[in-house]
Image (cartoon, rainbow, N blue to C red):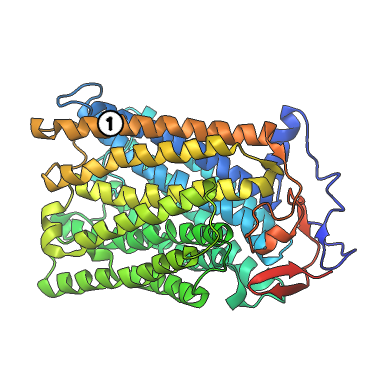
C-alpha cells in the first residue's frame, strides 16, 4: 500500500491512472486474486454473496415447489431435508454475512477517512477462504450420502449420524468462522486506530458504530460455534460422547452451546442492517438522525442482551421453570432498545422533506416488516405460546421477516444508496422501484400466510402435509417464485447501472447524505486518502477542510 504523502488531508488521485483497470480475462482474474484494495475486496464479497444468495434461493424454490401441493411431488424426503439444511447454511454463512462484510470493506475506510483496512493482506485472505468453504459446502451434495440433513442448526444426535457431507459442512463452517474472526479483528483495528483524528467516537456514523459492535460480537461467538461443531466432529470420529446420552453426554448440551452462538448471530445479521438504514433515512428525510446518542447506546444494549437470551429457542427441552421465566423476561427486555431504534427512525422521518427513491423505499419497507418480525418474536418469547408454536411454520415466518425483510431489504437499500458513489453511474430508478414493489408484494405473499399455517399446527421441515394446509402452501409457493424471479430484475439493474448507467459527477449524489464518503469525488477514487483528512463539522456532517 502506497504511503507517500504528497498532499495531506486530501483524497488520493495520484494512483488513479495506474491502479490497473486491467483488460483481458487473465489480467482481471489476476488483479482480483491479488488485490489488497478495500474497494476491490468489498466488490468481491458482494458478488460472492449474491451468487450464494441465488444458490440458496434455488434451494428455497425447490422446497416450495415440493410443498406446492400435498403428497411427494419432486424430491425424496431425505433430499428435501438436505435442501432445508443447506438453504439455511448457505443463506446465513454464504449470503447475508459476506454481503454485510462487503459493505464494511467498501464503506468503513471511506466513512472514517482511512487509507484502507488496517490489515490489507489479511483482508484478502479473509475473503478467499469463503469460496473454498462454499465449494466444500455445496460440493457435499455430490457425496455418496449427500449433504447434511440435520437442519441448519445441526442438532445432535442427527448430526452425529450423517455421512461425509456432514464432515464437509463442519470444515466449511470452520473456514467461514476463521474468515469472520479475521475480518472482525480488521474492522475493529481500522475503526479504533485509523479514523481521522478530527472524528471522535460519538461523531462516527451509526453505520460505523453498528459494525464496531458487530465485530466484537463475531469475535465473542464464532469460536463458540467452532467449539460446538468440533465436539460434533470428535463424537463422530474419535469416540467422544459430548452429545451421546449412552456415553454420559447430553444432546441438549449441543443446543445450549449452539444457541449461545446462535442468538448473537441474529444480531450479527441485524446490527449492520440498522447501520445501513440509519444512513439512508436521514439522507432522504433531509434531517439529521434523531437521537444519535440513544441509537449508539441502544445498539450496544442489544448486543449485550443478546448473550443472555439463548434458551428462548429451547423452551420445550425441559428447562426448569425459573430458567424459562428468566429467558422469557430477558427476551422481552431486548424489545426495548430495538423499539428505541424504530422510534428514532420514525422520528427522523417526521416532518422531514422526504422523497421516495428506491433506497428510501427499501429502508421504509425494512422498518415496517422488521417491526412485524419483532412483534412475532415477542409472541414467541412467551413460553406457553412458544410451546404450541415451537418448530411450526410460525417460526419460519418470524425469522424470515427478520432476515429477509430485515437483513436483505437493508442490503438492497444500501446497494441502491451507494452504487452511484461506487461506480459513478446512476441506476435505473424506474426499474429499482419495480424491484422494490415486486419484492415487497411477493415477500408478504410468501411468508405472511405461513403465520396462519403455524398457528394451525403445520410443522416445519416436512416434505408432505395434511390436506387442510394445502391452500396457504400453494399461495406461499406462488409468492416464493415471484420473489425469486424479482431478484433477477435486481441483477439486471446492477449490471445495467455498471455498464450503461447515466454518469454522475456530483459529490453528493443524494442531497441529504451526510457522512464523509459524500465529500469525496464521484466515483470514489481508487485510493481515497493519503493520510487521515482534516475535518470541519457542519452540524453532524463532516467536511474535508481545504
Q: Quadrant of the C terminus?
A: bottom right
Q: Outermost residue toward the top?
A: 73
> Which residue occupies the foreground of this view, 102 or 26?
102
Residue 149 at x, y percent in the picture:
27, 38
349 horizontally vs 128: left or right: left
- Viewed as shown, does residue 4 lie left or right of 181? right
Q: Quadrant of residue 442?
A: top left
Q: Residue at x 33, y 61 (%)?
A: 263
The answer to whether 132 appears left or right of 402 in the picture is right
Relative vertical location of residue 503 with respect to residue 322 in this rendering, above or below: above
Q: Position of residue 294 (x, y in %)?
A: 46, 76
Q: Element at badge 1?
A: helix
> At 40% from the left edge and 48% from the top edge, which residue is drawn?
92
From where the camera sits, is residue 98 visible?
A: no
* Percent coordinates x, y for residue 407 in the rendering: 43, 51
Q: Is residue 334 above or below residue 71?
A: below
Q: In this orientation, which residue lies closer to the viewer: 541 or 265?
A: 541
Which residue bears the numbered disc 1? 477
Amino acid at each position: 500500500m502506497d504511503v507517500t504523502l504528497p498532499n495531506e488531508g486530501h483524497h488520493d488521485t495520484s494512483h488513479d491512472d495506474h491502479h490497473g483497470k486491467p483488460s483481458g480475462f487473465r489480467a482481471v482474474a489476476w488483479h482480483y486474486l491479488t488485490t489488497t484494495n478495500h474497494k476491490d475486496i468489498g466488490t468481491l464479497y458482494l458478488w460472492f454473496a449474491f451468487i450464494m444468495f441465488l444458490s440458496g434461493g434455488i434451494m428455497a424454490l425447490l422446497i416450495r415447489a415440493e410443498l406446492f401441493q400435498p403428497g411427494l411431488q419432486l424430491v425424496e424426503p431425505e433430499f428435501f431435508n438436505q435442501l432445508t439444511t443447506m438453504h439455511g447454511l448457505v443463506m446465513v454463512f454464504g449470503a447475508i454475512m459476506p454481503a454485510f462484510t462487503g459493505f464494511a470493506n467498501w464503506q468503513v475506510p471511506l466513512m472514517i477517512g482511512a487509507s484502507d483496512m488496517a490489515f490489507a493482506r489479511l483482508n484478502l485472505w479473509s475473503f478467499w477462504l469463503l469460496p473454498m468453504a462454499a465449494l466444500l459446502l455445496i460440493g457435499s451434495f455430490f457425496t455418496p450420502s449427500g449433504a447434511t440433513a440435520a437442519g441448519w442448526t445441526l442438532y445432535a444426535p442427527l448430526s452425529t449420524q450423517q455421512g461425509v457431507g456432514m464432515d464437509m459442512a463442519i470444515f466449511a463452517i470452520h473456514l467461514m468462522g476463521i474468515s469472520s474472526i479475521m475480518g472482525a479483528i480488521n474492522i475493529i483495528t481500522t475503526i479504533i486506530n485509523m479514523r481521522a483524528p478530527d472524528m471522535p467516537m460519538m461523531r462516527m456514523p451509526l453505520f460505523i458504530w453498528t459494525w464496531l459492535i458487530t465485530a466484537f460480537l463475531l469475535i465473542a461467538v464464532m469460536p463458540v460455534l467452532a467449539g460446538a461443531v468440533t465436539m460434533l466432529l470428535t463424537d463422530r470420529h474419535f469416540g467422544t460422547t459430548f452429545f451421546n446420552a449412552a456415553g454420559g453426554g447430553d444432546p441438549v448440551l449441543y443446543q445450549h452451546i449452539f444457541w449461545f452462538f446462535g442468538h448473537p448471530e441474529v444480531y450479527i445479521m441485524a446490527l449492520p442492517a440498522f447501520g445501513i438504514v440509519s444512513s439512508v433515512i436521514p439522507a432522504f428525510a433531509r434531517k439529521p438522525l434523531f437521537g444519535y446518542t440513544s441509537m449508539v447506546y441502544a445498539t450496544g444494549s442489544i448486543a449485550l442482551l443478546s448473550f443472555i437470551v439463548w434458551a428462548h429457542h429451547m423452551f420445550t427441552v425441559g428447562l426448569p421453570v425459573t430458567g424459562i421465566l428468566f429467558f422469557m423476561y430477558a427476551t422481552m427486555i431486548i424489545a426495548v432498545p430495538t423499539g428505541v431504534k424504530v422510534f428514532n427512525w420514525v422520528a427522523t422521518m417526521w416532518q422531514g422533506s422526504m422523497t421516495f427513491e428506491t433506497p428510501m423505499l427499501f429502508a421504509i419497507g425494512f422498518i415496517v416488516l422488521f417491526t412485524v418480525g419483532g412483534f412475532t418474536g415477542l409472541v414467541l418469547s412467551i413460553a406457553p405460546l412458544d410451546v404450541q408454536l415451537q418448530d411450526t411454520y410460525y417460526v419460519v415466518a418470524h425469522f424470515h421477516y427478520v432476515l429477509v425483510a430485515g437483513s436483505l431489504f437493508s442490503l438492497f437499500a444500501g446497494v441502491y444508496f451507494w452504487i452511484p458513489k461506487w461506480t459513478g453511474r446512476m441506476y435505473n430508478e424506474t426499474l429499482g422501484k419495480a424491484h422494490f414493489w415486486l419484492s415487497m408484494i411477493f415477500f408478504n405473499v410468501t411468508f405472511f400466510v405461513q403465520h396462519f399455517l403455524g398457528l394451525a399446527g403445520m410443522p416445519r421441515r416436512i416434505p408432505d402435509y395434511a390436506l387442510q394446509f394445502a391452500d396457504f402452501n400453494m399461495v406461499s409457493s406462488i409468492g416464493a417464485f415471484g420473489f425469486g424471479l424479482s431478484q433477477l430484475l435486481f441483477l439486471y439493474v446492477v449490471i445495467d447501472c455498471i455498464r450503461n448507467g447515466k454518469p454522475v459527477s456530483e459529490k453528493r449524489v443524494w442531497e441529504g447524505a451526510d457522512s464523509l464518503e459524500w465529500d469525496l469525488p464521484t466515483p470514489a477514487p481508487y485510493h481515497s486518502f493519503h493520510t487521515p483528512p482534516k475535518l470541519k463539522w457542519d452540524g453532524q456532517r463532516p467536511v474535508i477542510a481545504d
